[in-house]
Amino acid sequence: MSGAKNCPETPRQKMIGMMYLVLTAMLALNVSSSILEGFTMVDNSLHATIESANIRNQSQYADFREMEKKNPKKVHEWLVLAAEVKKRSDDLYNYIEKFKVDLVKLADEKGANDSAYVKQIIAKDNLDKAGQYGIIGGHGKELKNKIDSYSKFLVDLSADPVKKNMYKSIFSTANSKDGKPWESTMFEMMPVAAVVTVMTKYQSDIRASEAEIVQYLKAQTDASDFRVNKIEALVIPDSRYVIKGDRYRARIVLSAVDSTAKPSYSVNGSSLAANGVYEVGCGVAGQKSYSGQISIPGNDGIVRSYKFKGDYLVGEPTATMSNEDLNVVYRGIDNKFSISVPGVAATNISISVDGGTSALKAPGKFIIRPSRDGEIKINVFAKIDKKQLQMGSSVYRVKYLPDPKAFIQSSDASAKLSRGGFMTPAALRSSSIIASYGGDELVKANFRVLSFTMIARGVAPLQVSGSRMSPNFIDKLLKGDILMISNIKAEGPDLRPRDLGSISIQL
């Protein structure tokens, strides 16, 4: 039920709004201060409107509480929301009231009253105090934040797009078209009488919006009642895809049914329990269907039946596994796997590895490391209806990493890896021996060179530990000499020692 129908704008409210606009426009033209007396009439009218709104709101809250006494289960949650509306409305209303009183006391000083009616203000035409209190004192920005919060609360609570836009418009604190902040527009060089009147109008808008939103909440207490001209039977399955060996479960309901009514249910000629839950074993794969009816007596005592149909698919447990890099798994490295199960979200897939370990990198993405030779078995599970069901498994061969090749790596990062050939003594002195698969690598693995032997004619062979060339050995060589790097030993991430042969270099 819309608030526009329940709380239409009266001619009196329209008149007040028009006068407010006219007087504000006249102020913008810098007319005589006597015009400010017109705000007294507007302010008085707004206070009268507020008093009427307060009486109406009190009546609504009283009706709401009586409704809860009669049907607490239906009304309580809406009454709680209404109480929150009242609290937030009162908080903002009272803050604005204090805002007005403090501003008037600042303007009138010792002659100020504890209430903020325009008719009681002495310095109605004072143009400085509003800016001093609202802008310099920072109270305007605080008020803006409170109005924004209240507006968002009303917008979030309302379901009617028209009402949402109305609340956004009424309580808008946007900058002016020329980019001037709301606080400056409201308080900068504005007469105290005008500011107080505008604040009173905000209070009137608060009470009117409060009335509309509470009326809307009252209407929601009856929104779920059985008041439709068409009734349909619905089948609500937990899932239409069922794994073989699991059970299919669905709820049979009437749309818009009264919660106090007690329908009877039947499926394929057999009665169901009073809660309307249909559950059946799923031992055979394939497409399944069923039908039935719901019977319920109407207000006239006549029993009416509503038919329904449903279907579901029983599938074989299945999983799709893909080793992203290879068709085997290697020891010592991260083997990347993509695993999926049709009809199951990747976040609900898990695995176990017989003969290795696994780590989840992302939904559906796993890192697998074998811990034994021969074969490993990967088992895939899916979480369906809060249960872990095995969806399949695959066996993979386990191999050791293939032997890499030995290369000469210069200290120049831009230089390519070398397998020998011509090199200068200077380049050799800063070079290392590395083990790698080179540019044609199918897998990524880090190898470490353990040792190698440097051999040249006329120089005693040198056994080197590690991967760095011996500058002292190279200094003994002449241009044209042949340097043999032999007996190269390396170790991979699988900790298996490798003999990588030799490399020939001519200086």
Image: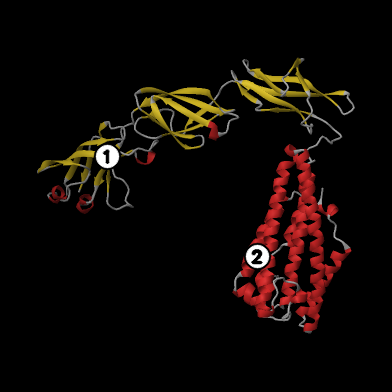
Examine the image and state in which quarter residue 260 appears: top right
Q: Which sits in the foreground, 316 or 184?
A: 184
Q: Which residue is mark 1?
A: 448
SS at badge 2: helix
Between the C-alphas of marks 2 and 1, the distance is 67 Å
Residue 288, by quadrant, is: top right
Q: Position of residue 100 (x, y in %)?
A: 69, 70
Q: Is residue 386 left or right of residue 216?
A: left
Along the line of sight, the residue nearer the viewer: 97 or 494: 97
Q: Can you tell which quarter of the image residue 107 is in?
A: bottom right
Q: Which secondary structure lies at badge 1?
A: strand
- Mark 2 vs mark 1, foreground winner is 2
Q: Amino acid at mark 2?
A: Lys
- For the point 67% across and 59% down, the residue is 91
| Residue beneath the point at 17% across and 48% down | 480
Say which mark, if any, is on residue 391.
none
Which residue bears the numbered disc 2? 144
Residue 35, above or below 465: below
x and y, in percent, of residue 374 in the image: 36, 22
Which residue type carries mark 1? Arg
Inspect this view and state whether residue 156 appears: no
* 293 on left or right of 247: right
**Which residue is outermost to the bottom?**
32
- What residue appears at the point 77 percent right and 79 percent down from the top-left corner? 27
Sort mark 2 into few (<14), some (14-19) or many (20+) by Cα contacts within 10 Å.
some
Task: Please tell me which residue lies in front, 487 or 319.
Answer: 319
